[in-house]
Image (cartoon, grey):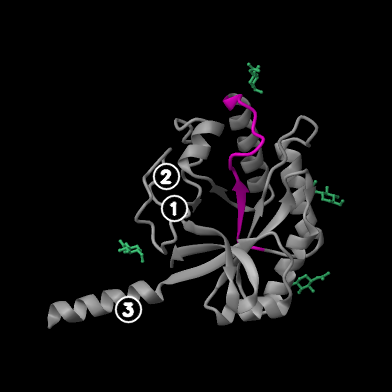
Amino acid sequence: MLLFLSITVLTFFHQVNTKLGFDSADAYTINTFRCMRGQGYDFFIARVYHSYGAPDPVGVQNIKNVKLAGWSLIDAYIFPCLKDTCPSGKQQVIDALNFTQQANVSFNTFWLDIERFAWPSNKTFNRQFISDMVQQAQAMGAKVGIYTLSTYWNEIVGLDFTTFSSLPLWWPQYDGVQNITDFKPFSGWNLPAIHQFSGGVQEDGCSITIDQDWYPD
Ligand SMILES: *[C@@H]1O[C@H](CO)[C@@H](O)[C@H](O)[C@H]1NC(C)=O
Ligand SMILES: *[C@@H]1O[C@H](CO)[C@@H](O)[C@H](O)[C@H]1NC(C)=O
Ligand SMILES: *[C@@H]1O[C@H](CO)[C@@H](O)[C@H](O)[C@H]1NC(C)=O
Ligand SMILES: *[C@@H]1O[C@H](CO)[C@@H](O)[C@H](O)[C@H]1NC(C)=O
């Protein structure tokens, strides 16, 4: 009986103390966020900078709309621009954060999206680029996190680059499960803060396509 009770209590806490969220670069209305709350979603991560090198007004409007829908768990991410012609990493962060500040929107964590994209093969350059972004964001008062997984991180900066392992990790692994059973520590990260567990999923209840995210509360 005691064992049964313990399991029940654990299961109860397991279910209560987690959060389901989503991220997407599409434009959403206040009503869409209200609908998503009805589907059990609690947090949203907005893209605020395009990989072609400009702030993203859609992401800023999404932050306004999600707040008006009554949500408070809101993060933002920058998808950095990596061509030779792009602004420096530092300048991209300035442009992204200045844009959100001027739009008077705030958010919790500012995530750097470090995924396989147009990154140069020069890992020294990439390490410096990421370090410049982190330092600038922190200098502007942002709470910084890193979005990556081990294969991306290995290709872009090398698995021995552990400088930012004290920052929260947003971990994309499309295994479809709302837990971190499949996570294996890498580059100093022992646990992810958020698990992005699906990509490009249709949320039928609200007719939108999203990436789904989860974290233990
Ligand atoms: C942000 O923009 C304002 C107005 O354009 C400017 O005065 C300020 O220096 C900018 N901040 C940074 C950190 O560049
Ligand atoms: C900025 O946002 C804050 C809090 O959300 C609000 O109190 C303030 O009036 C806004 N300022 C402007 C200029 O919109
Ligand atoms: C790699 O990038 C670093 C830092 O920008 C630079 O000093 C170095 O010359 C680059 N190496 C090559 C082979 O281009
Ligand atoms: C993770 O979730 C999957 C799917 O719901 C489940 O089969 C598995 O047992 C879970 N793992 C843990 C450790 O809870």
Residue denoted by label 1: 192
Q: Is residue 156 left or right of residue 175?
A: right
Q: Is residue 70 visible to us here?
A: no
Circle 3 crowding by C-alpha within 10 Å: few under 14, some 14–19, many from 20: few
Point out the image quarter for the N terminus.
bottom left
Foreground residue, 98 or 66? 66
Q: Is residue 45 above or below residue 148?
A: below
In the image, what residue occupies the spot 65% across and 76% down? 33
- Magenta-colored stretch includes residue 108: yes
Left/right placement of residue 95 relative to residue 24 reads right
Q: Tell me the amino acid under the disc marked 1.
A: Pro
Q: Which residue is mark 3?
A: 12
Query: Which residue corresponds to the image point at 69% horizontal and 56% vertical from the top-left?
Result: 47
Q: Secondary structure at mark 3?
A: helix
Residue under label 2, please give it: 189
Question: Quadrant of the rendered structure where residue 208 is?
Answer: bottom right
